[in-house]
Amino acid sequence: MVHTSTSEVYGAHVLDPDGTRFLECGMALRAVNVGYAEDEIDQAAWGQIRNGNNLTRPSLIELEPAELLVGLIASVDMVKFAKDPWIALSYRRGESELAGTERAVYRRALEDGVERYLEGTGHQDGLQKVQWSRLMNERYKETLQIDHETTARYYTASITRKSEQHKQLEQILRGRGLQPRRIADVACGGGGSSFHLVELYREAHYTLVDLNEEAIDMARETMRGRNATCFVGDIYHLDLPDNSFDLVVCWQTLSWIEQPEAALRELVRICKPGAFVYASSLFESRHDVDVYSQVFDHTRPSSAHGLHYVYNTYSLRSVRQWIDGLVSELQLHEFEIPIDLDYEGRGLGTRTVRLETGKRLQLSAGMLLNWGILEVRK
Ligand SMILES: C[S@@+](CC[C@H](N)C(=O)[O-])C[C@H]1O[C@@H](n2cnc3c(N)ncnc32)[C@H](O)[C@@H]1O
């Protein structure tokens, strides 16, 4: 046993008082650790800290040695900095096929002008989350309103083109043979989901709710002449009665809000017993890990106001816990996009990467988007 208090430390080596040299287990055998009381490394690290590197966000200084190692050692074809569980998890999810594209994805994240801060990861139980407040709710709306141009483009796109996710929802609904009469579209944005569902359920009545007034103005326009009611409302406190809808849809929203558990319970509350809730969002079905992160997109005006977007991925384990005892069935339909998506711009924006197997992954500023459609039966 080596008592480090009375020994000297050189990189991964430890000398005991008799001068016997030991390899220090953690330093030598874990992934890659540097900077353990080595003057040169300490100084370089200090210089980087002064440059603004904080060891939580990706930086070029990491990419450079990683590329150097890959170039130098024939048997190495990837170097992993596992400090950011999203990235570690993402690449595991993409499995080994992603190795060849990994560096490109990582570089892309740096060049996109997007910063990501992890608020917490791990099981929901042990997670330290920032105390949620009503203010955060308002801040998301403010972010969308300040980034008016990208928000409007996003809302409009959901109406003008039926997305592949909407097509998958249609397929699931047809398979279920549902004939809903009352449909709720919560956090409806410009009303895209309802607009496309009308093709399937022409006779139904649609209730569209969103916190953002601009979204509701657009949703009213989208649903003009159709059997619909649109109003400004909060997903956490819906002004709608219990057990009142045959179908509840919440599209591309749970991952972007701070309290998904409260939101999901509210969606279940307004759903009739035996009826279904469908929520498309980012989910992790293979690992029991949630990832909560805040993303500053420096290509959008909101970041200059100190405002961020939330990009969370929820494990099925957590989702089950949130609504345990409230629902009779829960299922995740994984979504694999069947087409290529191109995004030329910087900042947040979805593009696809094609793996050798033909499978496509969806990425936004280096983040893997594990889309899925959650199906819950009350
Ligand atoms: C990413 S957009 C999705 C919009 C739409 N469902 C779609 O698929 O096009 C998320 C939407 O959630 C809305 N939202 C955010 N917080 C909300 C809240 N607390 N209550 C209701 N809507 C909210 C936003 O205004 C935004 O329109």
Image (spheres, rainbow, N blue to C red):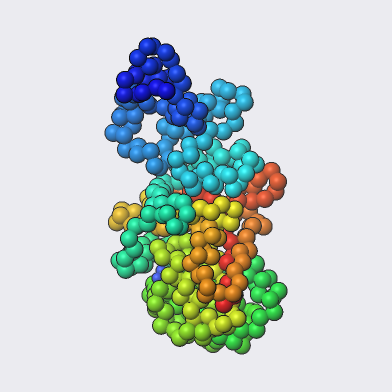
Q: Quadrant of residue 144?
A: bottom left
Q: 335 or 20, which is in the foreground?
A: 20
Q: Is residue 229 visible?
A: yes
Residue ID at (50%, 65%): 321
Residue ID at (40%, 58%): 309
Is 324 situated above or below 94?
Answer: below
Q: 102 or 124, which is in the foreground?
A: 124
- The quadrant in which the N terminus is found is top left
- The quadrant in which the C terminus is found is bottom right
Residue ID at (53%, 57%): 315
Q: Position of residue 206 (x, y in %)?
A: 53, 83
Q: Is residue 293 visible?
A: no
Q: 115 or 341, which is in the foreground?
A: 115
Q: Position of residue 148 (x, y in %)?
A: 39, 64
Residue ID at (63%, 53%): 340
Q: Position of residue 184 (x, y in %)?
A: 52, 80
Splitting the image into four quadrants, where does ligand 1 fall? Answer: bottom left
Is 374 situated above or below 35?
Answer: below
Farthest residue toward the top?
Answer: 19
Q: 134 or 221, which is in the foreground?
A: 134
Q: Position of residue 247 (x, y in %)?
A: 57, 79
Is 128 situated above or below 59?
Answer: below
Farthest residue toward the front?
Answer: 1
